Image (spheres, grey):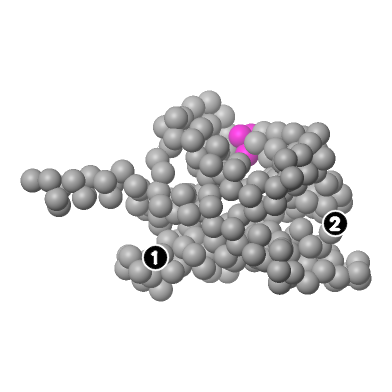
Amino acid sequence: MNSKNPINRIIRLFLGLFLFAVGIVMTINANLGLAPWDVFHKGLSSTFSITMGEASIAVGFIIVIIAFFLGERIGWGTVFNMYFIGYFIDILMLNNLIPTFDSYFLRIFMMFGGMFVIGCGSVAYIGAELGSGPRDGLMIALTKKTNKPVSFIRNAIEISALLVGYLLGGTLGIGTVIMSLSIGYFVQFVFKIFNFDVNNIKHRYIDEDIVMLKEKFIR
C-alpha cells in the first residue's frame, strides 16, 4: 500500500488501530492477567464505572496533553489513536466479538496471538506516518527531557501504570508478567517479518497541515 497517498494512509491507519484493539481484547479475554496499561484501564473502569474503552480514551487524552506540553508534536494518527482504539475495544468487548475459552492451553494461545496481532497493528498504524500513539509520544517526550535511556523511561511508565492500576483494582496475573517481559519481542518479531524499519518513518504532523492550509488560503 502506498503510504504517500492520503486515502491509503488513512485506510492503513484505521486498519492498524482496529488490529491493535483486536490484539488488546484477545489478551484481555485470555483471562491470564492484563498488560500493564490495561491493568490501569481496568482500575479506572472499576473505580469510575466506565468501560475499558472509555478508560483508554480518557488516559490517551491526558497523555496527549502532557506530551504536547513536553514538546512532542502531534499527528492526526495520534488523535485517532487516542479515541478509536478505545472505541474499537468497546465494540469488540460489549458485543462479545472475540471469544473466551476455558482451556488453559487455548487461553495461552489467545494471549500470545493477541501480542502478535498488536505487533501487526503497530506496523500498520505507524507505517501510515501520521504520528505516534499517545503512550509512545509520552515515552519519546520524557526520553528527550530527561536524557535517560528509552528502556528506562518505557519501563518506568509501564511500572507506574501497573502500580496505579493495581491500587485502583486492576487485575494482575501470570499473563501480566509474561506480557510485560515479551510484548516488545513480539512487536520486534512482527517488524522483522514485514521488514519494517521505524527509522525510515517520516511522520506528518498537524502543525504541518495547518501551515499548508494557511499558505493555500491566506495569501
From this viewpoint, is residue 215 visible? yes
3 or 57: nearer the eye?
Answer: 57
State the quadrant of the N terminus. Answer: bottom left
Pick whichever of labels 2 and 1 is earlier in the sequence.
1
Find residue 43 and report its image quarter: top right
- Report the predominant secondary structure element of the magenta stretch: helix
Amino acid of disc 2 = Leu
Q: Residue at x 35, y 69 (%)?
A: 7
Q: Dot 2 corresponds to which residue?
A: 32
Q: CA distance from mark 2 to mark 1?
A: 35 Å
Asked whether residue 121 is drawn in magenta, I would say: no
What mark, if any, has residue 9 been given in the picture? 1
Amino acid of disc 1 = Arg
Q: Position of residue 66 (x, y in %)?
A: 51, 32
Query: Which region is colored magenta?
Result: 151-155
Assess disc 2: are there few (<14), some (14-19) or many (≥20) residues with their C-alpha within 10 Å of its C-alpha: many
The residue most toward the right is 103
210 or 191: nearer the eye?
Answer: 210
